[in-house]
Amino acid sequence: MLMEGDNMGLFKPKLRKDIQDKINELNPKVFISVPHLNGLPIAENTLCQIYYTDNKIVIDGSGNTFNLSMDKVNAIEMKTNVEIQKQYVSSVAGGVAGAMVFGPLGALIGGRVKEKKVKDIQRYLIITYTSNDEIKYLGFDITHTPKGIEIVKLFNKNNLAKNSIEL
């Protein structure tokens, strides 16, 4: 039972002090902590903190801080990779039940190997930006971070507002 004044600690992990201090300093619209895939001069799968603010995206990873001005950001998208795996499973319980009812033939039929399909969906946050007249990309794995889609939605909403023209 949560008492008045509890910070719902059961649902929201406590952040390290340095991360909480940075959140207090930057006051980001969205904050996520996700593995880096590519685009930064740090190792793949390095855990990065991404702070999305009104005028920039700040990324902390591997002891480095990267600042990306929103003026340079061309697009922020979520891409998915769906992998369908086939697993073959046999049913021990089916074999036992089959043996009890129909004997050895029932055990063979009840315990036969069955094909089971498992869908593995991976989600990636892709930030496209321009640096020195060259288009570059940053990639992060947001498979286990549903909040990552908020960055995409916020960017698209703000971009639509910037690009709308009044007649």
Image (cartoon, grey):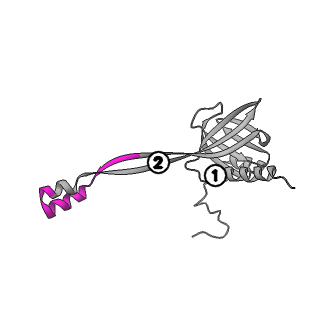
Residue 100 sits in quarter: bottom left
Element at label 2? strand
**Majority secondary structure of the magenta segment?**
helix
Q: Which residues are magenta?
A: 85-105
Q: Quadrant of the C terminus?
A: bottom right
Residue at image x 55%, y 48%? 143
Q: Which residue is mark 2?
A: 120
Can residue 63 be seen? no
Label 1: which secondary element = helix
What amino acid type should be assigned to the residue bearing mark 1?
Answer: Ile
Residue 86 is covered by the magenta coloring: yes
- At which x and y percent is residue 17? 68, 48
Which residue is located at x 72 percent, y 53 percent? Answer: 154
Q: How many marks?
A: 2
In this rendering, would 4 be left or right of 71? left
Residue 59 lies, in percent from the top left, at 69, 40
**What is the x, y in percent for residue 24?**
76, 51
112 over 138 or under it: above or below = below
Q: Is residue 153 magenta?
A: no
| Coordinates of residue 85 in the picture (x, y in percent) | 40, 45
Examine the image and state in which quarter residue 3 appears. Answer: bottom right
User: 94 or 24, which lies in front?
Assistant: 94
Q: Is residue 157 left or right of residue 6?
A: right
Identify residue for label 1: 149
